Amino acid sequence: MSQDQNNKSGSSITPSQPPSTPTKAAAPPAKKGTEVPAFENGLVSQIISRFGEDKIKVTYIRPLRMKVNVDPTGIVEVATFIRDNLGFDHAESVTGTDYPKDNQIEVIYQLGSYSKDDIAAHILSLATRTNRDDALLPSLTNVYKSAEYHERETFEMLGVYFEGHPRNERFLLPEDWADLPPLRKEFRIRGR
Amino acid sequence: MIKDLINPTNFNLMVSKISDILVKALDQPLGYAINWGRIWSLWPVHLETACCSVEFGAASGPRYDVERFGIIEAFGSLRQCDLIVVQGTVNRKMAPRLRMVYDQMPEPKYVIAMGACAITGGLYVDSYNVLPGVDGIIPVDVYVPGCPPRPETLIQGTILLQEKIKRSKIK
Amino acid sequence: MAKNLEHQIDESEKLGMQIVKESEDDRLMTLSVGPQHPGSGHFRFTIKVDGDYVVYCDPDPGYVHRGEEKMCEYRNFIQNIPHLERPVIHDSANITYSYSLAVEELVGIQVPRRGQFIRAIASELDRQIYTLYWLAIYGIFLGHSTMFMWPTGDRELFIDLMDALSGARVTHAFNIPGGVRNDMPLGFKDKCLRHISYFEKRLKEYEDIFYTNPLFIQRTEGVGILTKEDAIRLGVTGSVLRASGVPYDIRKAEPYDVYNEIDFKVQYMKSGDSLARAYVPLLDMKESCHIMRQLLDKMPESGEVRAKLQPTPKGPPGEAYRRVESGRGALGYYIVSDGSPKPYRVKISVGSFRNMIALPHLLVGSKLADMPSVYWSLNYWPVEADR
């Protein structure tokens, strides 16, 4: 709601940090004129107080949207904590982005809540990074069952193997696909 | 004189002359009748390839009633259809299935390529998973352009197909 | 195709086209409800049946996968609109609405007020057009051809309105980042109100004729029950979620544009079976007529409809996630920008793909004859799920 009021008052939307470098501080550096929204900050600080500042890196905290970056080793515990204590009960979408400049692939889970009313509009993005050449991540299917087909699609589109996922197999692409995973940046569309 | 006609050598000539007259008299009307039957009962296969299927569905609705041209989607088997309307983009995954469906249809069979994506690949010509046009795998009779073609355009396409069938000769 | 078999495949067992004979088991029969089937659309799923009961179901999408997300990276923000509409051609105002909201957040564009109202009207019109087509195909699946003819005829009225507004029947490319392409023609408001009044009477007739039909009720009541806990755990969305007792609608939960000024109720039902999943879109359509009347009332009389932009708008590096309630559920866009006029990554999170996970869950244990009514009631549009 507050975001739409921002829209109506005519002020431009302040953009967030550049996506390729997550900050290490507990709170993001404030842009001039805005402050960190209190409710969202409270949600994120619950996660930080449970797991510690060195494991959780906050990328941004905006009205209704929060993004948190975790190491692959700790992501299952953080996701279980978010589901049980904060109330985010399903994953809306799971996807990956290829950053060849950092030699990493970032997989991001957008988590939403159907059961709690005060966070019904919020999306908590849980991101993790893995090496591009040997992309291996633990699967969150046991924590969030809704992420199952999305993780399978991320496997075939980006080549990220999810350990613990029941089927790391071809889903949307044809059965005889023998090329690179299409969403990698070195896969160029012909003619462009 | 009749005795002259009905003797062995002349008899062959007489039979062949009568059959020539019969064939000439019946061939054109019979061909016309067969073609007339084919034109007004083109049954399409229920294979929806991509998004143009929505406009094909709208063409079967009450406003652009395509059933009055005989195009009834036969929900029986594929072996009793004779028209295949390729509705939209053909994928690399769908292409072998499309070919299998085309091969299973009995002769004579006709193909309408509906939409820009079925003609040349359309908007998706540079995608990694899309065939640039369907006439690489099956022979197309009529191309109906549009993205998606309005139902009136589809009806004009079927009338063109009907004209083409009328012109064909029955062997 | 051979992924689940352990034994060595003998040359004699190959039946061409990579079809391999499975192990001999007389009880189970594998059916491939494939893309050429009057009951499946452009989607294939494999089911194993034991007599009449389904014991295993495996969806196999991808027959319309056209690589939308990859193609977005090669076109700039405005050039992306035409091909992003094609996943759902008859609900294209919603799928481009969400994209425009995300781009406006990234680039920092302010949409004028009249443009916001016209966008919302186009979104509601397209929602009606989509839901009526869904109802028509449901009629075909259940063998009820009147249920195909009436909605297909009635949606032509709304398509006429969309035609007058934008110039094309479907895939009109009406929404762009910054507003809408052009203003409403003269006399549109009266025509729209007339069509809405006619349609509200027709909705009563639909309810009387289709939904109280004893055959329809017998085929859909108690079939494919999705409980509330399962619906939340599986993360389904849209009318499937609302039919299982969760009153979640993004227009109410996270209002975008002018929806916080409109007064409407979220329609939901508690039973969670196929009948509820067929009923909720009808109630949504009634509510949508109500919303359209309010939008037409409250719209400012004149004003700009589009923000002025440079030909290739670009914004600072960042990312945005915005979502919209479409005919099938929450449609979200996750866009990452790196400062250039082309997006770095676009991810489309569609309602159909999220609802697909309910299909194996519901079909396993049910009878084969219930398959069409369960499958289509999940509001699954295959072209959108494959993108």
Image (cartoon, coloured by chain):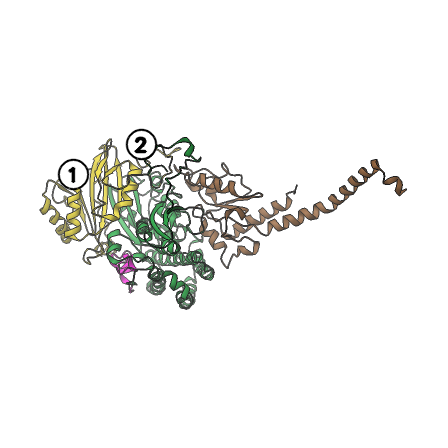
Is residue C258 visible to us here? no
Rendered colour, chain A: yellow
Q: How many marks?
A: 2
Question: CA separation, marks 2 and 1?
Answer: 28 Å
> In the image, is residue C320 part of the stretch drawn in magenta?
no
Mark 1 burial class by Cα count in 10 Å: few <14, some 14-19, many 20+: few
The one of C153 and A154 positioned closer to us in this rendering: A154
Q: Which chain is brown?
A: B
The chain that hosts pointer 2 is: A
Whether the magenta-drawn stretch holds residue C249 is answered as: yes
Q: Position of residue A187 (x, y in %)?
A: 33, 33
Whichever of labels 2 and 1 marks the residue nearer the N terminus, that label is: 1
Give percent across and percent down for residue A189. 37, 34
Q: Residue type at mark 1?
A: Thr
Q: Which residue in the structure is indicated by mark 2?
A: A186
Point out the image quarter for the N terminus of chain C: top left
Q: Quadrant of the C terminus of chain C?
A: top left
| Label 2 element class | loop
Q: Hue of chain C?
A: green
* Residue at 78 percent of width and 43 percent of height: B18
Q: Is residue A184 visible?
A: yes
Please state the extent of the stretch shown in magenta in the rendering. Answer: C241-265
x and y percent of residue C236 in the render?
28, 53
In the image, which disc is placed on residue A73? 1
Report the mark closest to the observer, 2 or 1.
Answer: 1
Q: 10 Å neighbourhood of mark 2: few (<14), some, or many (≥20)? A: few
Q: Quadrant of residue C288?
A: bottom left
